[in-house]
Image (cartoon, rainbow, N blue to C red):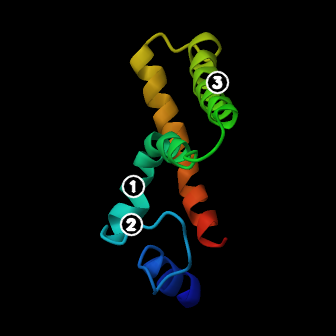
Amino acid sequence: MHGHIKMHHAHTNVIGLGDSSVWKVPFLPRIVYLFLAPLSVPVITPLVALAHLKGHSLGVVVRTVLMIALGLYSQYWLLINVSGFRSVHGALFCMLVCRAMLSVPYIHVNIFQ
């Protein structure tokens, strides 16, 4: 418990003290980093993906943008047509919450890369 909770989680986003990670925000307090920052991951993930495309061929860029759009639209379509959401805002909020919940394990697993 001491090694994992007090040593690992106490410094997951402190450069030089924690484990390596590609998603470090050292200026955030631990509570904000662990509980509020994951809500922004679904919003910034497509933007980060697009930023990583700099220097790639046009075909790769178009394919990636289409796959991102297809993934987002597919989840939206399923929420509206299968899950029974009647509100566009409700479906979009559900998408944000679902993706944010899954980003917490992503951040944690990413630390061990």
Label 3: which secondary element: helix
Relative height, residue 36 to residue 7 (above, below): above
User: Sequence order check: which comes first, mark 1 or mark 3?
Assistant: 1
Measured Cα–Cα span from mark 2 to mark 1: 9 Å
Res. 25 mark: 2
Give residue 76's position: percent from left, percent from top.
56, 21
Q: Earlier in the sequence, mark 2 or mark 1?
A: 2
Q: Name the residue tied to disc 3.
A: 70
Q: Does 68 appear above or below 13?
A: above
Q: What's the residue type where badge 1 is placed?
A: Ala
Asked whether, in this view, residue 59 is left or right of residue 100, the answer is right
Q: Position of residue 14 (x, y in %)?
A: 41, 78
**In the depicted view, which residue is nearer to us: 72 or 29?**
72
On screen, residue 87 above or below 1: above
Instruction: Tell me, for residue 45, which label it has, or none.
Output: none
Q: Which amino acid does the dot numbered 2 rest on?
A: Val
Q: State the SS at label 2.
A: loop
Disc 3, disc 2: CB below 8 Å? no
Instruction: Give the CA separation, mark 3 to mark 2.
Output: 29 Å
Q: Residue at x 57, y 82 (%)?
A: 4
Q: Secondary structure at mark 1?
A: helix
